């Protein structure tokens, strides 16, 4: 026979076989399903699979672990530093002497490493910090941390546009354009 | 308009755009360098991440500079050809 505790326990909302998206959107944090229509571009277009990590969240007053991508103002962070790599991570962010500069460096790193992503999708990624998608959640690893920064998104978008132009600029596009004008 | 003149027109626009991209990237590069040189950053992880990004941007700028230089030489060569042709034509007519 089940004990009263077990009978009263609510069914967990989060599933082991799903990948979630945790958006750090101060003062709240929101969780959503990563491969739903709205967020799927992050997995297919950006290849954020490598940022999937295990995070501890509070679900119906119980702690539970979920596999999720944590987006810190659009910057995916893994939980711990991987030695020998520069992959942005929460451990380094927490220990950084300037969280804003760590975030900016991380975003530039991300934007330099992305290829074939159209600028409107980058805008969509950066806009995720303004939108409230999914449900508010508590993430244990982010509790009592002062991680609020005020990033300049248009600066980042400008940088991405420049990098894309630098990598795709082609004399023949100008030549063909010239011919069309005749 | 012959092919040479078309190419000169296209090259002018291309060089202008390359210059704009280099200028824009250079501004971002300088901003990041100023972060790196500031005394605010005391931890190695932030420094290392910044350094990696700065090196990558510098590589992009250097590669654009090389393209710009090579293109500019082609451009100058074409201009020289055209002015020589003009000179020849005017000498012949005289």
Image (cartoon, coloured by chain):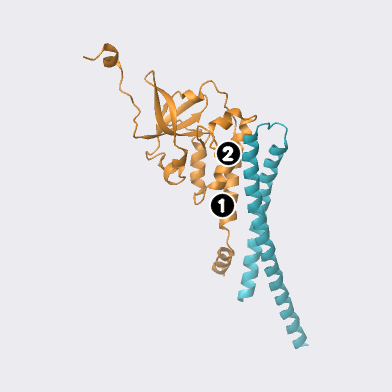
Chain colours: A orange, B cyan
Q: In the rendering, at what x and y percent does residue B32 appear? A: 67, 41
Displayed quadrant of residue A83: top right
Marks 2, 1 in one chain = yes
* Count of numbered marks: 2
Q: In the rendered view, tell whether residue A58 sits above or below residue A175.
A: above
Residue at mark 1:
A164
Looking at the image, tell me whether mark 2 or mark 1 is earlier in sequence order: 2
Label at residue B57: none
Q: In the rendering, at what x and y percent does residue B2 appear? A: 61, 76
Residue furthest to the front in view is: A83
Residue shown at 54%/35% (left/top)?
Answer: A81
Please tell me which residue lies in front, B1 or B72: B72
Chain letter for mark 1: A
Displayed quadrant of residue B90: bottom right
Q: In the rendering, at what x and y percent does residue A57 appear? A: 42, 24
Left/right placement of residue A4 relative to residue A26 reads left
Please tell me which residue lies in front, A125 or A20: A20
Q: In the rendered view, tell whether residue B30 sits above or below residue B67.
A: above
Q: In the rendered view, tell whether residue A114 sits above or below residue A36.
A: below
Residue B74 showing in the rendered view: yes
In the picture, the quarter occupied by the N terminus of chain B is bottom right
Disc 1 residue crowd, few under 14, some 14–19, many 20+, Cα 10 Å: some
Residue at mark 2:
A106
């Amino acid at each position: 026979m089940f004990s009263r505790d077990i009978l009263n326990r609510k069914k967990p909302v989060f599933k082991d076989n799903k990948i979630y998206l945790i958006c750090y959107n101060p003062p709240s944090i929101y969780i959503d399903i990563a491969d739903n229509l709205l967020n799927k571009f992050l997995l297919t277009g950006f290849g954020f699979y490598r940022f999937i990590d295990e995070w501890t969240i509070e679900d119906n007053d119980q702690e539970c672990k979920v596999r999720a991508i944590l987006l810190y103002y659009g910057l995916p962070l893994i939980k711990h530093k991987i030695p020998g790599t520069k992959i942005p991570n929460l451990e380094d962010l927490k220990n950084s002497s300037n969280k804003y500069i760590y975030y900016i460096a991380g975003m530039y790193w991300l934007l330099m490493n992305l290829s074939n992503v159209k600028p409107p999708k980058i805008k969509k990624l950066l806009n995720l910090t303004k939108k409230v998608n999914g449900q508010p959640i508590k993430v244990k690893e982010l509790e009592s941390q002062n991680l609020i920064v005020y990033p300049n998104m248009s600066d980042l978008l400008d940088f991405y546009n420049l990098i894309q132009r630098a990598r795709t600029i082609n004399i023949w596009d100008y030549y063909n354009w010239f011919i069309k004008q005749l | 308009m012959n092919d040479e003149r078309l190419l000169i027109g296209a090259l002018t626009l291309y060089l202008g755009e390359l210059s704009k991209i280099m200028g824009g990237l250079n501004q971002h590069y300088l901003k990041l360098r100023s972060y790196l040189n500031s005394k605010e950053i005391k931890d190695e992880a932030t420094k290392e991440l910044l350094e990696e990004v700065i090196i990558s941007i510098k590589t992009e700028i250097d590669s654009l500079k090389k393209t710009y230089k090579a293109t500019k030489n082609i451009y100058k060569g074409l201009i020289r050809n055209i002015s020589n042709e003009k000179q020849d034509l005017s000498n012949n007519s005289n």
